[in-house]
Amino acid sequence: MNTVTQVPLSALKKETSFPLDQWYVAGFSWELKEQPIARTLLNQPVVLFRTGDGVAAALEDRCCHRSVPLSCGTVEKNGVRCGYHGLLYNTHGACIEIPGQEKIPSKAKVRSYTISEKNHILWIWMPKEAGGAPTHEAPDYPHHDDPKYKFGGGVYHYDAPYQLIHDNLLDLSHLGYVHLKTIGGNARQHMTAEMQVSSDEKTVRVVRLMPGTPPPPSYKMAWPFQETCDRWQEIEFNLNHLSIWTGAIEPGTGALDDPQRGGFHLRGLHGITPETETTTHYFWSMASNRHPDMPETIATVLQQIEFTFDEDRVIIEKQYANMKRFGERATWMDIHVDVGANRARRIIAKLIGEQNQPAA
Amino acid sequence: MNTVTQVPLSALKKETSFPLDQWYVAGFSWELKEQPIARTLLNQPVVLFRTGDGVAAALEDRCCHRSVPLSCGTVEKNGVRCGYHGLLYNTHGACIEIPGQEKIPSKAKVRSYTISEKNHILWIWMPKEAGGAPTHEAPDYPHHDDPKYKFGGGVYHYDAPYQLIHDNLLDLSHLGYVHLKTIGGNARQHMTAEMQVSSDEKTVRVVRLMPGTPPPPSYKMAWPFQETCDRWQEIEFNLNHLSIWTGAIEPGTGALDDPQRGGFHLRGLHGITPETETTTHYFWSMASNRHPDMPETIATVLQQIEFTFDEDRVIIEKQYANMKRFGERATWMDIHVDVGANRARRIIAKLIGEQNQPAA
Amino acid sequence: MNTVTQVPLSALKKETSFPLDQWYVAGFSWELKEQPIARTLLNQPVVLFRTGDGVAAALEDRCCHRSVPLSCGTVEKNGVRCGYHGLLYNTHGACIEIPGQEKIPSKAKVRSYTISEKNHILWIWMPKEAGGAPTHEAPDYPHHDDPKYKFGGGVYHYDAPYQLIHDNLLDLSHLGYVHLKTIGGNARQHMTAEMQVSSDEKTVRVVRLMPGTPPPPSYKMAWPFQETCDRWQEIEFNLNHLSIWTGAIEPGTGALDDPQRGGFHLRGLHGITPETETTTHYFWSMASNRHPDMPETIATVLQQIEFTFDEDRVIIEKQYANMKRFGERATWMDIHVDVGANRARRIIAKLIGEQNQPAA
């Protein structure tokens, strides 16, 4: 538990620092309006757009003529047109018009990416080999479409590597120190609550139950808790996103580990998509139920969540900046709360290791 | 026409990435007032100043004592004085006073550059060998002194290599996509108009005639055109500047390719001077005639031109930023409009190649 | 005197570019309030804090758990607590609490630094070997506690290497060019006044006496000088700080080199502490006496000093930026005023040379 780990700063240099042949969150459906969006994903500059026909698409973000970003162009019925000399591309990356020139060379094309739009989420397939097709379906995230919940979300940009955000989310014991003003609660209680960790080859699950704990400020704004409540935190790590189900019931109104439990629910989606080795897109949403007596709380809940996530961003960016200041002098010492995060790191390290192995 | 060219990103690294033994635009006469000006030209930090005696001069921008920029100093009757310990330099770079010290060492000097001030333009000779003298006269640009025209101008700084600006100016077919609000006109007509390209060892000439085209917004503000006009674009590329003569006559009022033609004239000077391999100074002026019924249009014309040039800057800087994002993955595919620009690139490549060759 | 020196840009790269086993100014006592302070000193990221018990302390600025800066944490009675997971450190760098975990591993610690708090100054010992103890006492600076004087001070950050600031302070002949509006006076008189320079292995002393000189604006605001005054400048360079005693008496009212002289006194402390090889912390204070008829001048004096030091910062940062622009082309030519500064550079070069020598 108290091993000293060399921080893998050197490992951040390689192109293959991310698990590939995976779906990643590229954005939310509501982001795609009239203008194309430029977004670098896993080091690859991508333009996201929705055609006039309503199809969400993703291409390499450059015109094959003179490298102007297609994201500076305009969306048309069936593609995107470059804003410099008017070359038009369809959703597969093929140039289908060069104004003033009859012949379109076969080389006139750019890479395309597979987009799967489900549950208001734009999933993008990031293949090992350029142009590789998905080998499985994009994840389901039904809570966005569950009538019991209302949800909202947003996008953060982090100046920090993606795995530092995994670490943060897989151990919510920091709530008592970082998020005192919103979802924090009693620091000691968080640190001493028993943590159950389970995992397989692709997922890690961390559960912490905290009966008889004082409800934190955000909970009290959204639900009529009295002096104490019984809280749960259920974190599920997947390679491309984390699902975090937190909440609380009034003391003694049910089993705290029963998935059918009532009370106040916060269902968080955390799409952690590397931009580069050292920067990350953080796509989040929060779905919440409402107490019959307090039906209009979702806006307040989202404000609180946004404030909370900003606190995390500040500390993680400072953490990473400090890792860079100290360089190789910054070793890490594990403590009891790191079990889940370390398992997630091992899953990713194994996948990347296999990826980098020369084919037999 | 549809060749795929590797973008010469690697070529941007070398000191000798610019044709030397050439005049370049260093500034406009009206810029030299009481304060010296700091400007890096072809990687060389230069201070420009006009002495109290009225002489325009250029020196290496550092005091030989402790490297403080001379551009932080003050101009005197016959030189520039360092603002730290008061060393005074004449226009040839010789230190002519060290306050408090009688002897002036022979080493007390900095490099000087030859300035030729003509037609309100400050031309600077950038020699192959330090201190090399001009081998020919600086260019004439008579339109600044032609009573038929009024002119104004300005200076832009580009975060992009100079040749991307040449590319832009040697192919005005982008007007229909980039400059719709000002000088654009009909995109298709621009793209399909016949382009005549001619060149020799030092210049490229691109002419495009567009009879019967709708006058763009800027033209209508400056000249009482009706529904259509006959437009011309005559671009002349020189190593150190481009002259672009655009304009229009009312339909059927003369031969469109007659240099004596009447109508509305825009005579643009584009002094494209590399700051470094990846940044550029863009000195421009626009001289225009006025219709007898609309004599006060020059201010409006200049506003429109400034707006237009800003649109170009935005797209070229985005183009270059994208080239850096993609690195070696950003290949270029030529289309029909690139003929003139490619010839200019070949002229420059040949000169730089000869320059880099070891002397026999 | 007119030697040409290669600017030691290359020397700026090495870890051991600073004299070690020395006290440096880390801050002023009044800076340590409720919040810890992050400050990089000689390339070492340090957190400064004052415990609830009133002890000033300095630790390596990282938690040994996950590298979050301790300067983002909170100060407690006997230490500083990390703001991420609550690890608590005492003033010696030992972790004394890991919330939720009973065993504290022996590895749970970070480096500590010795702080000596004297005369409102926080001196930090920067050892050659990690954890090395001071071999001598921190300097005395009694003028902060002299009832004859009032003082104030501040902290500047310089984008320039520390020795450029030494150069500036060891030769006040620049006052006539850089500080005309405040403490400048007549430029020629400054440059031609005789300069007495003396030195030993650790200190350099530069004295300049200027009888019968016009009092500069700042002096007249603080003391009822008439048309002329007799000025002195006494600069004492030490490795970790400079003491500069400037002032003036009314003409003929005493010996200008008598340490008991009356008149107007400005006693400046200049704690020049490298942040990195290319950036510097500049801790300054100014203690001044007051004329019986003008007792409330200290605020005005400090305003003027602050303005003056800002002028220095601007020119030194421009000097350094210019050294970087010119790189190895920026040679230095000494003039008569450089004697003191060059001796200080030799003292430092000798110490660093000895430091870098392999042990026998």
Image (cartoon, coloured by chain):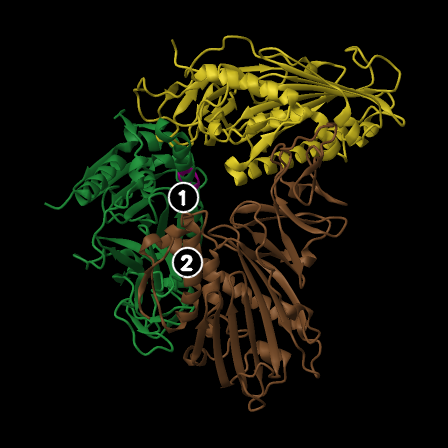
Chain colours: A yellow, B green, C brown
Q: Would you place residue A290 above or below residue C108 in this image?
A: above
**Labels 2 and 1 share a subunit:** no
Along the line of sight, the residue nearer the viewer: C324 or C335: C335
| A192 is within the stretch colored magenta | no
Q: Is residue A239 left or right of residue A114?
A: right
Q: Is residue B109 left or right of residue A126?
A: left
Q: Chain of mark 1?
A: B
| Marks 2 and 1, how far apart at CA | 40 Å
Give the residue type at disc 2: Ala
Which circle marks residue B159 in the picture? 1
In magenta, the rendered stretch is B312-316
Q: Would you place residue B11 above or below residue A8 in this image?
A: below
Q: Is residue C62 left or right of residue B72?
A: right
Percent x, y of residue A83: 43, 32
* Residue shown at the point (86%, 13%) measured from the top left: A254
Q: Is residue B199 left or right of residue A233?
A: left
Give the residue type at disc 1: Asp
Residue carrying label 2: C349
Along the line of sight, the residue nearer the viewer: C114 or A255: C114
Residues packed near mark 2 inside 10 Å, few (<14), some (14 to 19) or many (20 plus): some
Percent x, y of residue B83: 42, 68
Check disc 2 and report its element: helix, strand or loop: helix
